[in-house]
Image (spheres, helix red, strand yellow):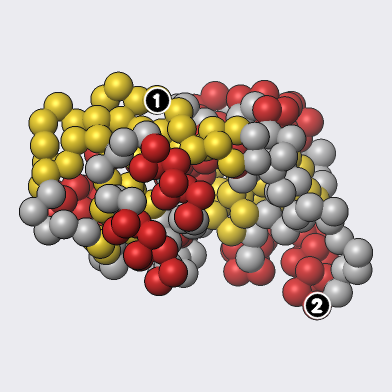
Amino acid sequence: MILTELAAFLNKELNLAAFPGDCSNNGIQVEGDSEVTKAVFAVDASLESIEYAEDVKADFLFVHHGISWGGGFRRITGIDAKRIGLLLNSGITLYAAHLPLDAHPELGNNAGLCKILGLRSIEPFCEIDGANIGFTGSLSRGTAVETLVKKLKNALDFPECNYYGDPDLKARKIAVVSGGCSEEVLTQAAAAEAELLLTGEFKHQLYHPAREMGLNIIAAGHYATETVGPKAVMEKVGSLFDVEVEFADFPTGL
C-alpha cells in the first residue's frame, strides 16, 4: 500500500493530534520508500530492530520508542548516524507512537493489560503531559496477587514479574500504567483509590512512597508491558491492509 495512506490511518487511529505535549515526535520520524509491502512492529527503534527490518526486507518499522524526541537532532553522529543511515539506505520508514499508544482505549498498552487482568468498569486516569495515558478498573471479586501475577507472566512471557506489597492482598480496584513508573503515577493511582498499581519498571526510590500511599505494586517489566500495544496495532494493520506484518521481539529484561 501507499506509505502516506498507512501513515494517515495510523495518525488518525492513534489520535496523535491529542498529544501535543508528548516529548516523542510521534508519527513518521524517518521517511523511506513510498510503498509498503511488509511492516515490522517492535518496542524500540534500536539498531538491532532496524537491522532485523532490513534482513526481512521490510519497508516500514513501527515502534513505541522512536529516535526523535523533543527538539530533535542537532547533529546526526554516533548511534544516531548508524540508525538513520541504515533506515535511509534500506528505504525503511520509521514510525513512532509513544503516549498515543499507551493511551489508546482499544489498541493501547494499558488497555491490553486491563484485558489480561480481566478488569471491568474501566476509566481513564493518570494525566501525563496533558493527556490521560492509564486506566483504572475493577475485578468482580477480590483476587490474590499471585493469581494476577501468573496471568501476566503467561500473557507477557516475562518470568521476572515482581510484586511489592501486602502478600495477603485480595485486589479489586487496580490502576494500570505501562512502562516506567514515577511518583506522579503513584500519587494519581492513590488518588483514584486503587489498591494495586500494575506498571512496568519500579525503582528503589519509589518503594517507600508507594508504601506510605497505601499502594501495592506489580512490576511486570518495562519492555514486556509495552509489547502489548505494538502487537495490537500490528494485528489491526494486518487485518485491514494488504501488508505483511511481523513482530520483532528484542527483550531487554527490564
Q: Is residue 191 above or below residue 40?
A: above
Relative placement, left or right, of 95 versus 211 is: right
Name the mark on residue 78.
2
Q: In which quarter of the image is residue 49?
A: bottom right
Relative placement, left or right, of 17 versus 163 is: right
Quarter of the image that includes the N terminus: top right
Residue 147 horizontal/vertical position (percent):
13, 49
- Front-lying residue, 108 or 7: 108
- Front-lying residue, 177 or 93: 177
Do the residues bearing badges 1 and 2 touch, measured as CB atoms within 8 Å? no
**Which residue position is annotated with label 1?**
123
Residue kind at label 2, given as amino acid type? Gly
Residue 204 horizontal/vertical position (percent):
40, 71
Q: Is mark 1 on a helix, strand or loop?
A: strand
The answer to whether residue 186 is visible is yes
Residue kind at label 1, given as amino acid type? Glu
Relative placement, left or right, of 199 versus 57 is: left
Look at 54% across and 53% down and name the residue there.
42
Q: In which quarter of the image is residue 166?
A: bottom left
Look at 37% across and 34% down and name the residue there.
192
* Mark 1 residue crowding within 10 angstroms, few (<14) / some (14–19) / many (20+): few
- Front-lying residue, 171 or 232: 171
Distance from Cα at disc 1 to Cα at disc 2: 43 Å
Quarter of the image that includes the C terminus: bottom left
The answer to whether residue 92 is visible is no
Residue 164 horizontal/vertical position (percent):
25, 62
Q: Which of marks 1 and 2 is nearer the N terminus?
A: 2
Q: Which residue lies furthest to the bottom in this view?
A: 78
Relative placement, left or right, of 245 versus 118 is: right
